Amino acid sequence: MTVERVLLAEPRGFCAGVEMAIKALTWMTRIFEPPVYCYHEIVHNEWVVRAFERVGVVFVDDIAQVPQGAPVMLSAHGSAPEVIAAAQERAAVVIDAVCPLVTKVHHEVKQLASKGYDIIYIGHHGHDEAVGTVAEAPEAITLVEPETGIDGFAPKDPTKVALVAQTTLGIYEWQHVYQTALQRFPELKTARKSDLCYATTNRQGAVEQLAQECDLVLVVGSHNSSNTQALVRVARERGARAERIDSAADIDPAWLEGVKVVGLTAGASAPDHLVQEVIDRLDPSMGFELRATTEEEEYFPLPRQLRAFVTTLQGLVEAGVTARKPAEPSLLERDREWTATEALDLISA
Ligand code: SF4
């Protein structure tokens, strides 16, 4: 390969919601005997899902597949109210690892529906997040794909229309639908900024800059990861050739013919070691450089139910015999410093 330089986007990879969800499922595998059940892939990344399967996590797409009394985690993408209710009825313990930014959109939908709005939801049919969000108010929501737009949308009252979006869309595709909706419905109600989350916006901003300096952009992430696919589209919109890869093994040498500078980023659910492996495979003669656009400090605590559960268990253990000195903070108390990468190392050891 003839690559001279790799430009590495920053931020890239794990967002705060994914960090929280991976750590939460790691706790579940440490607390319970396998199998632990997880409704939907905990995050949309092939490598992460396989790593959890190896330690006894069983991913299901139907709560009815969970045996009565088994522990269940609900994925980061957010679940429909009826799924949560069914899980609570079946499982001994239910921990919901939904990202708080998805929960925010669920609240918006419920509020708007209760006020009589017809809601345009821009999202991808069949994506776990879209399915969970639409289920909050199916009678009031019309799901529109960003590429299709709102042509077929006919509200009861054009003065009571709201627009809500999946958190992981491409910035431009969201804006396009938003502008069209605003023209048709001048009183359109929408979130103050957009529903696209900080991680989606920041990663796309970083790849957008990078794309202008590169012959080719590689995006590490799985095919069903919406924000990964959005990164590919944004890079292409900025004029770069862009390809999604699950890992270094997917790089087609033909893509690199005549390419001197490769841009590299990763979707919000892709582990960073996969990015490092891509750099190793490309083996750029002049090394790699970071292209940082913004710093991220977001942190989402573990789900409340899990913290309560772990605290109770710790109390029970410490009431018996414990090696931990009382003054020493527990792993739960140090959660902000403990990373999902360390959690994955732990289960992969
Ligand atoms: S991509 Fe955004 S909405 Fe999705 S888990 Fe990450 S922070 Fe939450």
Image (cartoon, helix red, strand yellow):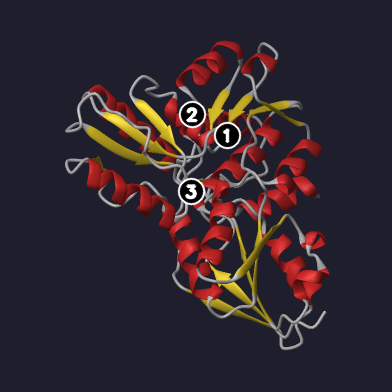
Residue 82 locus on image (x, y percent)? 49, 16
* 162 sits left or right of 289 in the view: left
Q: Work out whether mark 1 precedes mark 2 in sequence or the reverse, and give the earlier one.
A: 1
Residue 206 locus on image (x, y percent)? 49, 69
The answer to whether any part of residue 343 appears in the image is yes
Mark 3 = which residue? Answer: 168
For the residue marked with disc 3, what is the amino acid?
Thr
Residue 327 locus on image (x, y percent)? 53, 50
Q: Residues within 10 Å of mark 3 (few under 14, many from 20)?
A: many
* 81 sits left or right of 61 in the view: left
**Element assignment for label 1:** loop
Q: Nearer the viewer, residue 122 or 270?
A: 122
Q: Residues within 10 Å of mark 2 (few under 14, many from 20)?
A: many
The answer to whether any part of residue 330 appears in the image is no
Residue closest to the far front: 151
**Element assignment for label 3:** loop
For the residues marked 1 and 3, what is the alpha-carbon distance in whole angstroms? 15 Å
Which quarter of the picture shows residue 148?
A: top left
Whether label 3 lies within 8 Å of ligand 1 gets the answer yes
For the residue marked with disc 2, what is the amino acid?
Gly
Q: Work out whether mark 1 precedes mark 3 in sequence or the reverse, and give the earlier one.
A: 1
The residue that appears at 31% across and 34% down in the rendered structure is 108
Q: Work out whether mark 2 precedes mark 3 in sequence or the reverse, and give the earlier one.
A: 2
Mark 2 = which residue? Answer: 132
**Element assignment for label 2:** helix
Camera-near label (1 vs 3) is 3
The residue that appears at 74% across and 72% down in the rendered structure is 279
For the residues marked 2 and 3, what is the alpha-carbon distance in whole angstroms? 14 Å
Q: Nearer the viewer, residue 215 or 31?
A: 215
Mark 1 = which residue? Answer: 75
